[in-house]
Image: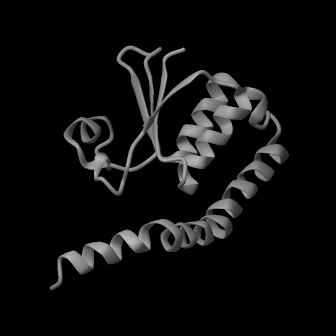
């Protein structure tokens, strides 16, 4: 399998993808990308993902290779391609509604809190150190 995941597993968005990779027991090449070191702003990464966000998945089983960014899109792609049992039956509108409800709840309830925590724990010290080194 030719899956490559560009990620920083400390962050909540990439963790969504790591979870489905583990659930499906996929063979994935992991490229750790450091936001602190600006690795997501390198030209080679920008060519792969013009938004410079994490995570980003490259599936070389497609020609040309398929590149998907945004964690929820990656998770749904992996589920559809390698683990359709994780998705609701397309003919069961009740199951689809419950799936979408859970996905929306995650987006509106869990994600904002998790992102604030990540900022406090990981990025705040980075932002403060830049401000100290480059006073206005």
* Residue 45 or residue 64, whichever sits in front: 45
Q: Position of residue 59 (x, y in %)?
A: 46, 23
Instruction: Please state, as top left, top right, bottom left or bottom right, where the N terminus lies in the image.
Output: top right
Q: Residue at x 73, y 33 (%)?
A: 23
Left or right of 37? Residue 1 is: right
Quarter that holds the C terminus: bottom left
Whole-percent x and y of residue 42?
Answer: 23, 43
Viewer-closest of 38 and 99: 38
Residue at the farthest bottom position = 136
Residue at figure coordinates x 79%, y 33% from the top left: 89
Is 121 drawn above or below residue 59 in the view shown? below
Q: How many marks?
A: 0
Give the colour scheme shown: one colour
Based on the displayed image, in which of its 4 quarters is residue 86 positioned?
Answer: top right
Q: Position of residue 65 (x, y in %)?
A: 38, 20
Residue drawn at x 57%, y 71% is: 117
In this view, 26 is above or below 73: above
Q: In the image shown, does 34 or 97 lie closer to the viewer?
A: 34
Horizontal relation, residue 47 to residue 70: left or right = left
80 shown above or below 11: above
Q: Nearer the viewer, residue 58 or 90?
A: 58
Give the residue displayed 51% in from the left and 74% down from the top: 120
Left or right: 126 in relation to 96: left
């Amino acid at each position: 399998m030719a899956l490559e995941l560009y990620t920083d597993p400390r962050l909540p968005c990439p963790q969504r993808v790591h979870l489905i990779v583990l659930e499906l027991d996929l063979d994935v090449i992991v490229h750790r990308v450091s936001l602190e070191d600006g690795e997501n702003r390198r030209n080679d990464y920008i060519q792969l993902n013009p938004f410079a966000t994490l995570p980003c998945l490259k599936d070389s089983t497609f020609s040309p290779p398929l590149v998907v960014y945004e964690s929820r899109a990656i998770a749904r792609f992996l589920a559809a391609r390698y683990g359709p049992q994780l998705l609701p039956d397309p003919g069961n509108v009740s199951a689809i509604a419950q799936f979408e409800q859970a996905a929306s709840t995650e987006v509106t309830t869990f994600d904002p809190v998790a992102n604030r925590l990540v900022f406090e724990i990981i990025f705040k010290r980075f932002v403060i150190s830049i401000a100290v080194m480059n006073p206005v």
